[in-house]
Image (cartoon, rainbow, N blue to C red):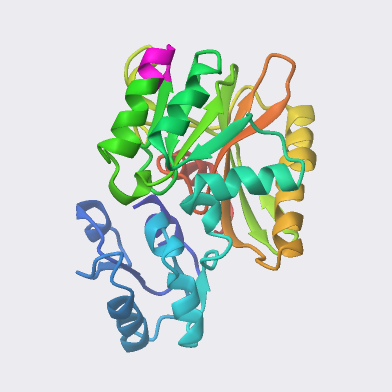
Amino acid sequence: HALAWKLADSCHVKKVFVAPGNAGTSAEPGVENLPIPADDIDALIGAAQAHQVDLTVVGPEAPLVNGIVDRFEDAGLPCFGPRSGPAQLEGSKSFTKAFLDRHGIPTASWQAFTDPDAARQYIESRPAPMVLKADGLAAGKGVIVAETQGQALGAVDEILVDQRFGGAGRRLVIEDFLEGEEISFICVASGTQVLPLATSQDHKAREAGDRGPNTGGMGAYSPAPRVDAELHRRIMDQVIHPTVHGLVEERIPYLGFLYAGLMIDAQGNPRVLEYNCRFGDPETQPILMRLRSDL
């Protein structure tokens, strides 16, 4: 809704079509909902052609990982977002962790597993707390912070054995727990060119006081008070620029919104928790409300 609202506000835009849209977008001037699921790429291509759409902006992560930008570009339709190659930064946590290691970008120590017994042996060799993540897309809910080894062993069963997250849990990533303050750092990236947007923070835990399981986001605010000019520089120099240059080196250049979920420790060191290949939900709302210029 926030993205459609801001796009429709542009003097260069006559009409915004949203697929599938919601009750909020249906009430926005200059916006029309289309009853097409976000993952029906064939129907979306047909609608873009029928309505002579000049630019498609992809909101959710699943179509990006599944190659919607590749398909649109193959059909001669401009589409803003990463192709399926760089979208692996969100589609596979093990891909991301290996990419970070290859390019010297700071992140937590980690290992990936498909065998439950191997994962259990690793857990028994590591101190708690630790973080267990389903490798694939799980709508922001595939992360379990285990305070004890026993909780971690239970999470192995949930993810690898019981397949709580379906196909997203065919591979499990286990990483060291990082202490600090979490922030969201979102940029617009094209190749090695980067335009950082306002910083933000979201509330992940379901309940007040940072209690309960993680969610896709219970709300957000911007700016992030923790990020001063020096930390902003360090994030750009140590995380963002090495990421976009690394993607170019690996021949999967990035175009679109690039979201780095970062943990900032007490000494001001940023380390990557995750990447999202889209505007953050719910961070989009406060960032676009603060944006004075045309998106």
Q: Tell me if 133 is positioned left or right of 24 in this view.
A: right
Question: What residue sits 63% from the left and 62% below the top?
Answer: 254
Q: Along the line of sight, which residue is nearer the eye, 116 or 241?
A: 116
Q: At which x and y percent is residue 256? A: 57, 61
Q: At which x and y percent is residue 140? A: 38, 39
Q: At which x and y percent is residue 96? A: 59, 47
Specify start and end residues of the magenta stretch as a single range: 146-152
Question: What residue sits 68% from the left and 44% below the top?
Answer: 100
Can the viewer see residue 176? yes
Q: At which x and y percent is residue 133? A: 44, 35
Q: How many numbered discs, if any?
A: 0
Taking the magenta stretch, the answer to whether it contains residue 34 is no
Taking the magenta stretch, the answer to whether it contains residue 150 is yes
In the picture, the quarter occupied by the C terminus is bottom right
Vertical placement of 134 versus 38: above or below?
above
Vertical placement of 22 versus 289: above or below?
below
Q: Tell me if 258 is positioned left or right of 22 in this view.
A: right
Vertical placement of 121 versus 8: above or below?
above
Can the viewer see residue 214? no
Q: Along the line of sight, which residue is nearer the eye, 57 or 81?
A: 81
Question: What residue sits 80% from the left and 41% below the top?
Answer: 237
Q: Along the line of sight, which residue is nearer the eye, 110 or 1?
A: 110
Question: What residue sits 57% from the left and 30% below the top?
Answer: 183
Q: Tell me if 193 is positioned left or right of 153 in this view.
A: right
